[in-house]
Amino acid sequence: MTLADETYMAFTTFKKDGTPKPAPVWPVDAGDGRIGFITSSETWRVKRLANNNRVEMQPSDARGRIKEGTSPQSGTAEVVEGSGFDSIHSKVREKYGYKLTLINGVHSFQRLIRRGGHANDRAVIVTLDDA
């Protein structure tokens, strides 16, 4: 089983002072041993990647709690849009199906209420150090 086969992963970015900030994501196989997921351009994880593209990934539950007996894997992350986003979004839709539809519906509702919110409009592709 590879990391991309997991249902949830804790994706950890790092603040400027080095503080780790994990968040759960839905991983998919991005090809060539890379892992992808979709997110919003408005999230802190995307903003932190602009300063430091070093990341860690580790199997977790839906709340980002690390699975026992697993170790973090280090790598570098790249935020993509356009055809790169389309490819990862398609893989996420295929793997997670109705869950993606539900999450996108919740985000749309939040945008209506807050006149803001966020949409899954970016993909992140992680190249692991050992890949």
Image (cartoon, grey):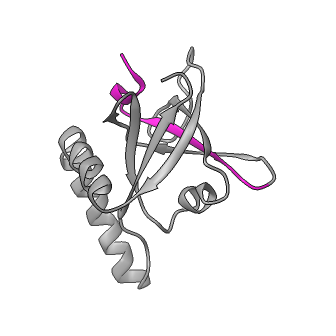
**Quadrant position of residue 33:** top left
Is residue 83 toward the left or the right of residue 27 in the image?
left
Q: In which quarter of the image is the N terminus?
A: top left
**Residue for point 37% across, 77% down:** 111
Q: Which of 39 and 81 is in front in this view?
A: 81
Give the farthest residue toward the right: 17
- Count how many numbered circles sit on residues in the image: 0
- Please state the horizontal and vertical placement of residue 117, each as a whole percent of the image: 43, 74
Please provide the residue range marked out in magenta: 1-16
Residue at the spot 52% in from the left edge and 45% down from the top edge: 77
Q: Where is residue 85 drawn, in percent x and y?
A: 31, 56
Residue 55 sits inside the magenta stretch: no
Compared to residue 6, the image places residue 124 above or below, namely below
What residue is rendered at 63% in x and 58% in y? 48
Question: Is residue 11 highlighted in magenta?
Answer: yes
Residue at coordinates 59% horizontally, 55% vertically from top-left? 49
Instruction: List x then y, in percent, for residue 110.
Output: 38, 73
Measured along the vertical axis of the image, is residue 73 above or below residue 17?
A: above
- Where residue 52 sits: x, y (%)? 66, 51
Vertical order, 18 against 122 (above or below): above
Q: Which of 110 and 120 is in front in this view?
A: 120
Residue at the farthest bottom position:
115
